[in-house]
């Protein structure tokens, strides 16, 4: 094999394209999966008539348990991913990571804004605060989910500001 | 997402610069290997600073690395 072709083959071997996920992309996947799992359980229980949909203390207990489980999952997962990631990827977010995070946060802000406006409009029509709190919580979860999804799409499909 | 209105010759320049890898270039420019890969594939438009840093790594002017696409106007 000519030397130049061998060199080109080695160079191609060293560059695996961008199909491999960065540490930050993997943590975004972790966030999405953990959030969908945790809050599907939470809102699923509310819709199936769990007292957390009506009373304050059951809501606080259920939400507390779900939030702690979610946080522990994300922390443990991040520690595992961090241990597996090359050091060069763990050090700092570069400008692409920051641009993607900024764009995703802007999109998520509008989701949160609309969600909170809906909660505000709904407020005068309900007596208890629990339902209202759950609606607000849903808006926050939806916004965070949109944030993570936009991050993932931007890493896969590209980002041009 | 739409491609940026310019192309680049980073891959060729890396090859000509002693078979520099994406990781090596990324280290020298201050971005990750994946960001260099995304720039090469037109999936990310770098900042002016990173574009200049890339050009300086190859000791080339900016327009030798990035070219405006004629059909983008």
Image (spheres, rainbow, N blue to C red):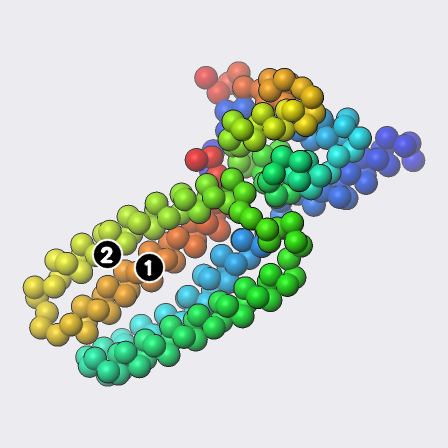
Question: Residue A67's quadrant in the figure?
Answer: bottom left
Q: Is residue A90 left or right of residue A14?
A: left
Residue A91 spot, x, y in % from top left: 59, 51
Q: Which residue is mark 2?
A: A115
Dot 1: what SS? helix
Q: Is residue B9 visible?
A: no
Q: Is residue A117 left or right of residue A87?
A: left
Q: Which residue is mark 1?
A: A142
Dot 2: chain letter: A
Q: Determine whether label 1 and label 2 are within 8 Å by CB.
A: yes
Residue B21 spot, x, y in % from top left: 73, 38
Q: Is residue A82 left or right of residue A127?
A: right
Point 47% across, 73% down: residue: A72
> Of the residues under marks 1 and 2, which one precedes in the sequence?
2
Dot 2: what SS? helix
Q: Is residue A82 above or below residue A157?
A: below
């Amino acid at each position: 094999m000519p030397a130049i072709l061998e060199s080109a083959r080695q160079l191609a071997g060293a560059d695996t394209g961008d199909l491999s996920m960065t540490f930050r992309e993997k943590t975004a996947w972790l966030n999405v999966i953990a959030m969908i799992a945790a809050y599907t359980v939470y809102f699923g229980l509310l819709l199936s008539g769990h007292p957390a949909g009506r009373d304050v203390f059951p809501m606080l207990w259920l939400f507390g348990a779900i939030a702690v489980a979610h946080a522990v999952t994300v922390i443990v997962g991040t520690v595992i991913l961090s241990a597996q990631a090359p050091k060069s990827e763990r050090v700092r977010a570069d400008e692409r990571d920051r641009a993607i995070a900024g764009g995703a946060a802007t999109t998520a802000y509008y989701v949160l804004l609309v969600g909170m406006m809906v909660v505000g409009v709904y407020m005068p029509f309900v007596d208890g605060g629990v339902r209202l709190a759950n609606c607000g919580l849903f808006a926050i979860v939806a916004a965070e989910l949109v944030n993570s999804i936009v991050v993932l799409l931007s890493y896969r499909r590209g980002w041009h500001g | 997402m739409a491609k940026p209105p310019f192309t680049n010759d980073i891959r060729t320049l890396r090859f000509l610069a002693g078979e520099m890898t994406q990781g090596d270039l990324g280290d020298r420019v201050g971005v990750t290997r994946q960001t260099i890969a995304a720039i090469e594939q037109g999936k990310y438009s770098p900042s002016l600073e990173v574009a200049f840093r890339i050009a300086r790594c190859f000791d080339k002017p900016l327009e030798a690395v990035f070219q405006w696409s004629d059909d983008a106007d």
